[in-house]
Amino acid sequence: MIEVRDVHKRYQTDHGPGPWVLRGINLDIPPKTNVGLIGRNGAGKTTLLRLIGGVDQPTRGAVRRHSNVSWPMGFGGGLQGTLTGRQNAKFICRIYGQEADMAERLERIQAFAEIGAYFDEPVKTYSSGMKSRLQFALSLAFEFDVYISDEVTSTGDAAFQAKAAQAFKDLVGKSSLIMTSHSTSTLRQFCTTGIWLHEGQAHWFDHIDDAVKAYEESIRA
């Protein structure tokens, strides 16, 4: 279970506090539920994922996680640019207490990320797509109750996208998935329930088709 309670979020700008991105979000996300997050560009989808994943904090309100939640897949932050991909992976293995089987996990991360020799180059030399692939591979190398994905299915070439899709399918029945995508067909493929973000508010739908319908009606209005 993930509880989102009266969450407000806005960012500081050079001219002071910016506009509210999220305004009074209240959600209960049950376990073993695949949730699709949908909304216009700038609606706050990535912001909400970052708050749920714990890589950002609300301006007001609270997010309570009663389960083991991943960082957002596809999120380019959290990597130390001066360290190589391998060194970053080793560091994360140590944080999660996975030193005993580190060699196996590193092999799995390197194979999934498909960045070749760059795995042993500083992350600051990576393209944004390479960083996303590494982050995705790192997330899958650990067991979480809830995986969070921000447009990961659009990362990389067709072969990598197919691999990412299969990875999501493999999670069904074992873990929850909270994801956002500009592709409504992708959301329908992987998600059963939906959250429509509109004008700073979050609207929960028990069926992803209803969330997609609400979103599509809003952009036609």
Image (cartoon, rainbow, N blue to C red):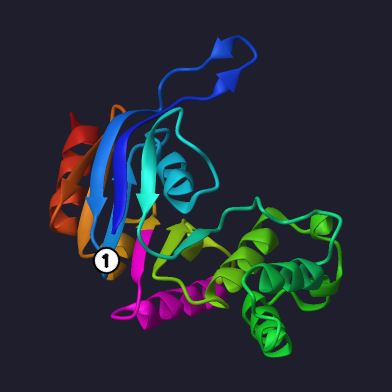
Which residue does the image show at 29% across and 38% down from the upper left? 5
Residue 201 place in picture, x, y as percent:
26, 32
Along the line of sight, which residue is nearer the eye, 107 or 115? 107
Which residue lies under the disc numbered 1?
Answer: 31
Q: Magenta includes 169?
A: yes
Along the line of sight, which residue is nearer the eye, 41 or 13? 13
Which residue does the image show at 48% across and 74% down from the upper left? 164
Which residue does the image show at 70% across and 80% down from the upper left? 110
Q: Magenta includes 80?
A: no
Main SS of the magenta part reads: helix
Considering the image in quadrants, where does the C terminus appear? top left
Along the line of sight, which residue is nearer the eye, 100 or 14? 100
* In this picture, residue 196 sits left or right of residue 120: left
* In this picture, residue 47 sits left or right of residue 86: left
Name which residue type carries label 1.
Answer: Pro
Tag 1: Cα neighbours inside 10 Å, few (<14), some, or many (≥20)?
some
- Quarter where residue 216 is shown: top left
Residue 59 place in picture, x, y as percent:
46, 27
Q: Is the residue 155 above or below the residue 180 in the image?
A: below
Which residue does the image show at 16% across and 42% down from the upper left? 214
- Quarter where residue 89 is shown: bottom right
- Quarter where residue 121 is shown: bottom right
Q: Which residue of the protein is positioned furthest toward the top in this rendering?
A: 15
Residue 151 place in picture, x, y as percent:
47, 56
Considering the image in quadrants, where does the N terminus appear? bottom left
- For the residue labelled by badge 1, is the local secondary structure a helix, a strand or a loop? loop
- The residue range painted magenta reads 158-178
